[in-house]
Image (cartoon, rainbow, N blue to C red):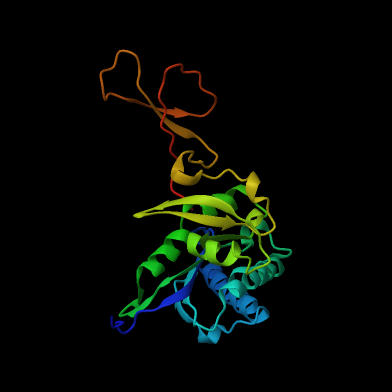
């Protein structure tokens, strides 16, 4: 079988700044500059050459397609450690509202050069991982966390489980990703935090965690017919024997 031109499987990185939209115009420029600075510093410190990376910027984020010579274990282990260190250095002494906190996703998959960037399911998946609920929730719940890393199941099984890094399974937590049309298993790591203490949705979505705040509940009231519901806003504890609740929360920031 002849391989079609342009097809390749590559190591893919997607990074995004938490809370970027809440900042003003001047802060946007500062954050974009700082994002490139910490990424460059982390790559240099771990022996990676970002000049050889194919990078697609998005203001508050970046998609990077790495060349074949960049080793997966170095990226999963050393690059993440150096990125966390660069973030700690950058944020030292800054007020919480001016700190930069990142979500990072790592996957190995198809990336095909296209007319407006890169195409391929690998590119889609790494983008879905970085924008999924688990890394959002991790940074929301742990104010001290600066970096939430999502690793695809492929990368986790091939690189971490096979002991090609200094990391162990205790450094990661299995999470379910349900983002648009993507429903996969992935692995979350939050350097410097107790990953087991965070309230995240269980694999398969059986227990969906919600952000703090008023909850929205839908109950079937006595005397109403099938399909008729009452929508109630709940701000405290509820005593409602026999009621069926559906819990939801607003969009993530």
Residue drawn at point x = 26 percent, y = 21 percent: 226
The quarter of the displayed image where residue 162 is located: bottom right
Is residue 169 positioned above or below 40 on the image? above
| 113 and 88: which is toward the camera | 113
Q: Position of residue 249 (x, y in %)?
A: 45, 41
Is residue 202 positioned above or below 70 on the image? above
Q: Position of residue 13 (x, y in %)?
A: 50, 71
Is residue 224 positioned above or below 125 on the image? above
146 left or right of 244 in image = right
Residue drawn at point x = 48 percent, y = 75 percent: 64
Residue drawn at point x = 74 percent, y = 63 percent: 93
The residue positioned farthest toward the right in the image shown: 93
Residue drawn at point x = 51 percent, y = 22 percent: 238
| 122 and 208: which is toward the camera | 122
Q: Position of residue 180 (x, y in %)?
A: 36, 54
| Residue 126 seen in this snapshot | yes
Q: Position of residue 118 (x, y in %)?
A: 37, 76
| Residue 104 seen in this snapshot | no
5 left or right of 131 in image = left
The residue positioned farthest toward the top in the image shown: 223
| 105 and 171: which is toward the camera | 171
The residue positioned farthest toward the bottom in the image shown: 51
């Amino acid at each position: 079988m002849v391989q079609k031109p342009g097809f390749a499987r590559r190591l893919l990185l997607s990074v995004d700044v938490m809370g970027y939209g809440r900042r003003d115009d001047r802060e946007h420029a500062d954050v974009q500059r700082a994002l490139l600075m910490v990424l460059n510093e982390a790559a240099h410190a771990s022996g990676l050459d970002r000049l050889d990376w194919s990078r697609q910027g998005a203001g508050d984020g970046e998609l990077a397609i790495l060349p074949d010579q960049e080793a997966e274990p170095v990226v999963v282990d050393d690059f993440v450690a150096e990125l966390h260190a660069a973030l700690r250095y950058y944020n030292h002494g800054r007020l919480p509202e001016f700190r930069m906190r990142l979500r990072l996703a790592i996957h190995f998959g198809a990336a095909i050069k296209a007319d407006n960037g890169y195409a391929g399911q690998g590119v889609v998946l790494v983008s879905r991982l970085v924008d999924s609920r688990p890394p959002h929730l991790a940074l929301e719940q742990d104010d001290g966390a600066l970096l939430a890393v999502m690793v695809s199941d492929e990368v986790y099984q091939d690189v971490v489980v096979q002991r090609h890094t200094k990391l162990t399974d205790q450094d990661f937590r299995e999470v379910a990703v349900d983002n648009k049309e993507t429903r996969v298993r992935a692995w979350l790591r939050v350097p410097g935090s107790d990953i087991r203490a965070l309230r995240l949705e269980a694999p398969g979505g059986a227990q969906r965690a919600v952000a703090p705040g008023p909850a929205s509940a839908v109950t079937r009231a006595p005397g109403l017919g099938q399909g008729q519901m009452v929508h109630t806003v709940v701000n405290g504890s509820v005593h409602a024997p026999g009621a069926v609740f559906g819990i939801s929360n607003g969009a993530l920031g």
